[in-house]
Image (spheres, rainbow, N blue to C red):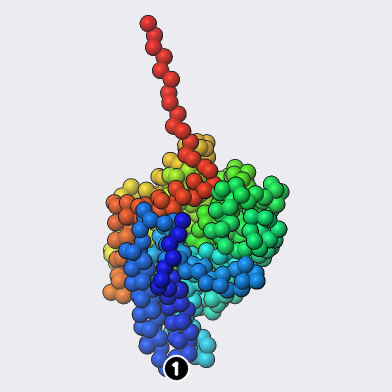
């Protein structure tokens, strides 16, 4: 089930960015450039470590690897337990790849902000690294209470990133972001406490425990069972928090405002990195801990996911703000991810996990390139643009590739993941799969129409001075485009790691893939 590591790989993974953030924030105010480069070095160190973990990970080995297990609060049955399966590893690598690129993309975002005692860049970089460290801890945690602590803690640095460095309405957006997610977290806290209480009263465990592996194994083997009403209530407590974080329609209302008001790099950090903890939590905790409740609520959640898919796509079409448009596309994409998780098929869940990775890359590319353009022109209004491809052909070309990835063009990374989700959905819920495919047409509409209005035609007044991507921006965009093409052509490198973890999850909840339908052949004589 798991292998214990003699070296604290995962502790280093989350501690490096957190310690780096603490060191950077206390640097002298005059060391602005040094703080930027120091933050980049820390993020690159995390990237190197994550790639080392990926290289050492054995897809055919134990489900959880690099496990660290130390007592934390023994009287409460909680420990410092870390470990990675294939699903968590994929998201760890995604986080480690994106953060250095986001630091480079937002290199000058905080130069005009006072920050803490004149440490604007210091604060910005430290907060970004703090979010990274807490996300990595959440992905690696195998203790439910430990996961909850960091699931909530990551909201604080993200709140300050939005409220301290965002646009004119940043305070309102930051407060809305915090209130929505804190409320979800409070509901989850009640469920976490409830789960501890039921384990403490069960004869299966010597005392109450927060050990995810122990509880999940007991549930899978049938040793630990819950009354349906209690299981449903606990499931909804966890699911509500994850649905707000992800977000799932209709708990999405905080996302567009936060994405628009945050700096482009911070918005990507929120949508492509932090929000993935919500969908990861559904797959990691909701299904193995409460399989019967998950099955019971499956039709409802799938319905909400499909509504979110279509809703996000329709509202994206009607947007006049390019950043808000991209934010609504993410709501649609999160719907696909949640749909694939809860259809409970191997294709659906493998596609969902791969979609988490691919969405992170495609959203980062599209949002950052749009941010580079907005910084040049000074407006987010789509109507203000036109003819940009004539004055900035590389910017327009990379924007097109990113947009085509967003609409899941074959050959680019999101296509495979979306295809797997739809195939996995069709085998169990063909009607929902058909409804979800409507978004494919709508996505082509909002992406191509946006590109046509902004990039083609004559050069509109005010766009003559728009210059092409500079080397720093190319350093951000080029790896993202390469990943979109690489994972579109060869997704096997990610699926080889993801598939065994998905199989283990489905086996633990006793959800085999539906048997293929065999057509009856009538022989006439």
Q: Is residue 55 visible?
A: yes
Which residue is at 52% across, 64% downward? 142
> Closer to the camera, 215 or 364?
215
From the top left corner, tell me how far across and down residue 58 is, in percent.
Answer: 35, 58
Which residue is at 52% across, 40% downward? 432
Vertical comparison of 30 with 127: above or below: below
Name which quarter of the figure residue 89 lies in.
Answer: bottom left
Which residue is at 49% across, 76% downward? 130
Q: Which residue is mark 1?
A: 28
Vertical comparison of 177 with 440: above or below: below
Residue 152 lies left or right of residue 453; in this view the side is right
From the top left corner, tell me how far across and down residue 32 is, in percent.
Answer: 41, 88
Name which quarter of the figure residue 238 lies in.
Answer: bottom right
Q: In which quadrant of the rendered image does the C terminus lie?
A: top left
Residue 227 lies left or right of residue 324; in this view the side is right
From the top left corner, tell me how far across and down residue 73 is, in percent.
Answer: 61, 73
Query: What is the secondary structure assignment of the residue under circle 1?
Result: loop
Q: Total number of numbered labels?
A: 1
Q: Is residue 336 visible?
A: no
- Outermost residue to the top: 525
> Closer to the camera, 143 or 321?
143
Vertical comparison of 394 with 133: above or below: above
> Closer to the camera, 294 or 357?
294
**Pointer 1 local density, CA inside 10 Å: few below 14, some 14–19, many at least 20:** some
From the top left corner, tell me how far across and down residue 93 is, in percent.
Answer: 39, 65
């Amino acid at each position: 089930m798991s292998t214990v590591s003699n070296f604290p790989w995962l502790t280093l993974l989350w501690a490096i960015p957190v310690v780096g953030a603490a060191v950077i924030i206390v640097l002298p105010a005059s060391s602005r450039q040094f703080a930027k480069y120091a933050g980049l070095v820390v993020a690159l160190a995390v990237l190197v470590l994550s790639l080392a973990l990926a290289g050492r990970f054995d897809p055919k080995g134990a489900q959880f690897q690099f496990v660290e297990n130390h007592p934390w609060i023994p009287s409460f049955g909680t420990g410092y337990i870390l470990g990675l399966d294939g699903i968590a590893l994929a998201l760890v690598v995604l986080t480690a790849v994106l953060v250095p690129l986001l630091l480079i993309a937002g290199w000058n975002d905080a130069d005009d902000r006072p920050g803490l005692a004149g440490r604007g860049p210091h604060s910005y970089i430290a907060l970004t690294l703090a979010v990274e460290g807490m996300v990595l801890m959440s992905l690696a945690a195998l203790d439910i209470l430990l996961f909850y602590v960091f699931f909530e803690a990551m909201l604080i640095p993200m709140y300050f990133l939005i409220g301290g460095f965002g646009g004119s309405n940043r305070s309102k957006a930051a407060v809305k972001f915090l209130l929505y997610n804190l409320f979800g977290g409070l509901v989850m806290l009640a469920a976490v406490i409830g789960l501890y209480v039921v384990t403490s009263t069960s004869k299966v465990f010597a005392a109450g425990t927060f050990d995810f592996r122990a509880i999940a194994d007991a549930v899978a083997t049938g040793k630990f069972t819950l009354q349906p009403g209690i299981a449903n209530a606990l499931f909804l407590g966890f699911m509500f928090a994850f649905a707000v974080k992800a977000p799932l329609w209709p708990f999405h209302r905080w996302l567009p405002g936060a994405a628009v008001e945050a700096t482009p790099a911070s918005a990507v950090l929120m949508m492509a990195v932090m929000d993935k903890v919500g969908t990861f939590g559904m797959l990691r905790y909701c299904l193995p801990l409460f399989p019967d409740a998950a099955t019971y609520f499956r039709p409802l959640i799938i319905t909400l996911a499909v509504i979110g898919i279509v809703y996000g796509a329709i509202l994206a079409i009607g947007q006049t703000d390019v950043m808000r448009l991209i934010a609504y596309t993410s709501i649609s994409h999160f719907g696909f991810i949640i749909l694939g998780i809860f259809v409970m098929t191997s294709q659906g869940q493998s596609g969902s996990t791969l979609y988490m990775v691919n969405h992170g890359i495609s959203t980062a590319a599209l949002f950052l390139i749009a941010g580079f353009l907005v910084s040049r022109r000074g407006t987010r209004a789509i109507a203000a643009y036109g003819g940009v491809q004539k004055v900035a052909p590389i910017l327009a070309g990379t924007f097109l590739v990113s947009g085509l990835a967003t609409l899941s063009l074959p050959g680019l990374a999101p296509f495979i993941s979306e295809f797997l989700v739809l195939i996995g959905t069709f085998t169990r819920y063909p009607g929902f799969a058909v409804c979800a495919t409507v978004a494919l047409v709508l996505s082509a509409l909002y992406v191509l129409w946006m590109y046509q209005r902004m990039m083609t035609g004559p050069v509109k007044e005010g766009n003559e001075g728009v210059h092409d991507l500079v080397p720093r921006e190319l350093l951000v965009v080029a790896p993202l485009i390469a990943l979109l093409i690489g994972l579109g052509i060869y997704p096997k490198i990610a699926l080889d790691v993801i598939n065994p973890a998905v199989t283990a999850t489905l086996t633990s909840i006793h959800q085999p893939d539906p048997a293929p339908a065999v057509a009856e052949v009538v022989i006439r004589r």
